[in-house]
Amino acid sequence: MLENWAWKPSTLQMMSGRHDAPAERLPLDLARKLEASKIAHAGLTNTRQVFLATLDQRLHSLPAIPPPEGLLAEIAAAAAAKDAASGTAAATSSAEAAAAAAALAKRAAAAVAEVDIEGVLRRLHDEVLGIPWTRGTNFAASFGHLAGGYDAAYYGAYQGTQIARSQLGGPCLRASAHARVCCGACRGSVCGARR
């Protein structure tokens, strides 16, 4: 939230100065240009959030594909074998467990191949970003939000925090970002008055 304070021309001037000339400050006109540039990529940033949210929703709205017959039991057995091999078992047991895990991974990958993630990405690039999808890439493979506990509420909350951050302390920042009284009043409006 202090990002807004850091972009104020008076703050930029206060923090500027070179190691060999600490009294030399950033010119005011340049500080104002820097402040104006902070929203240069806001549209792209917000569009990217819409892309991420839409990708998440599209993938999680696909019909469920049941795992291949017996796959879940095999995964449980492989996990048990790996746990046993991690103790005092011989290296052979560990190698066998690794081979079984690799075979299971191939079967699971074959099941997932039925989902056209590449097609979803390609369509969303056109629909949302307006930027052509790069052939041979798979952004979804490294998008941790898909399986990391985030859900639809995250994207709305993210945008909400951006709005709140931009509005936090507006009058204080306009008056004087460095005034202790004003900053205290802003803190009171956010945290509640505690005296």
Image (cartoon, rainbow, N blue to C red):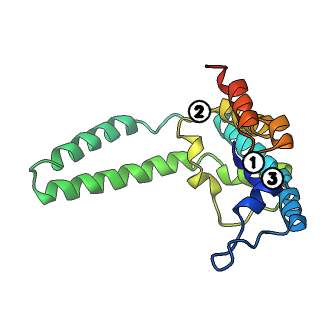
Q: Is residue 177 left or right of residue 146?
A: right
Instruction: Write down the quadrant of residue 189 in the picture.
Output: top right
Q: Which residue is mark 2?
A: 64
Which residue type does callout 2 highlight?
Ala
Q: Is residue 176 left or right of residue 112?
A: right
Image spot of residue 121 (x, y percent): 72, 52
Image spot of residue 158 (x, y percent): 70, 38
| Secondary structure beneath label 3 | loop
Q: Which residue is mark 3?
A: 8
How crowded pointer 1 is (Cα within 10 Å; few <14, some 14-19, many 20+) is rated as some
State which mark lies toward you, 3 or 2: 3
Measure how far apart labels 1 and 3 are at the Cα level: 6 Å
**Contact, mark 1 vs mark 3 (Cβ under 8 Å):** yes
| Secondary structure beneath label 2 | loop
The answer, for residue 132, to whether it is visible in the render is yes
Q: Determine the residue positioned at 81% across, 62% down.
A: 132
